[in-house]
Amino acid sequence: MTGKKRSASSSRWLQEHFSDKYVQQAQKKGLRSRAWFKLDEIQQSDKIFKPGMTIVDLGAAPGGWSQYAVTQIGNSGRIIACDLLPMDPIVGVDFLQGDFRDELVLKALLERVGDSKVQVVMSDMAPNMCGTPAVDIPRAM
């Protein structure tokens, strides 16, 4: 069985991705994604995280934002992360796999929050745009 050849646009995207300075820094530091740097920049300017906070991370996989946030809130803080995709464990992060819009998943998420007051809800989600006629048709033209 032969491997599938990448399209020119896929090859170009991969070339740009792997030459990105933040992707390279993330790999050197053993980080999950370049998103760690995006959140660090937000934290440096806005100071949104403080020790002891309870945080919910929606669309968390692969875990770059949770990985960063756990360094900011310390052992007294909590992070509850949720995503459709699986995510490798992160010490200090309680991960729930599923769609938070689903009633059972939302219930499980709220049970994990319990009586805690959530100070930050963060999300780095992007919609899946493939299969959306309003997007696919103009791209094909």
Image (cartoon, grey):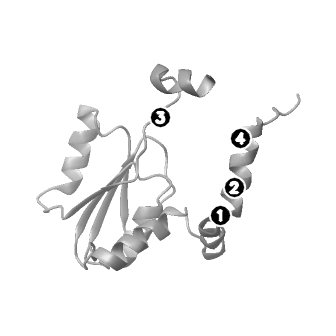
Using a 10 Å C-alpha cutoff, classify the residue at mark 4 as few (fewer than 14 neighbours), some (14 to 19) or many (20 or more). Answer: few
**Residue that badge 2 annotates:** 16
Q: Quadrant of the N terminus?
A: top right
Q: Secondary structure at mark 3?
A: loop
**Would you place residue 110 above or below residue 8 in this image?**
below
Q: For the residues carrying marks 1 and 3, which lies nearer the camera in this image?
A: 1
Label 2 sits on a secondary structure element that is helix
Q: Quadrant of residue 119?
A: bottom left
- SS at circle 4: helix
What type is the residue that disc 2 sits on? Glu
- CA gap between label 1 and label 3 equals 23 Å
- Report, in whole angstroms, how far the alpha carbon at label 1 lies from the one at label 4: 15 Å
Task: Name the spot of residue 6 as percent of width and height, x first.
Answer: 78, 37
Residue 9 image offset from top left, x and y in percent: 71, 39
Residue 99 appears at what percent x and percent y? 35, 37
What is the CA distance from the residue labelled 2 to the residue labelled 3?
21 Å
User: How many neighbours does mark 1 have within 10 angstroms: few (below 14), some (14-19), or many (20 or more)?
Assistant: few
Contact (CB < 8 A) between labels 2 and 1?
A: yes
Judging depth in this view, the residue of 99 and 108 nearest the camera is 99
* Residue with the mark numbered 4: 10
Q: CA distance from mark 2 to mark 1?
A: 6 Å
Nearer to us in this view, 46 or 25: 46
**Marking on residue 128:** 3
Residue for point 19% across, 49% down = 111
Question: Can you tell which quarter of the image residue 116 is in?
Answer: bottom left
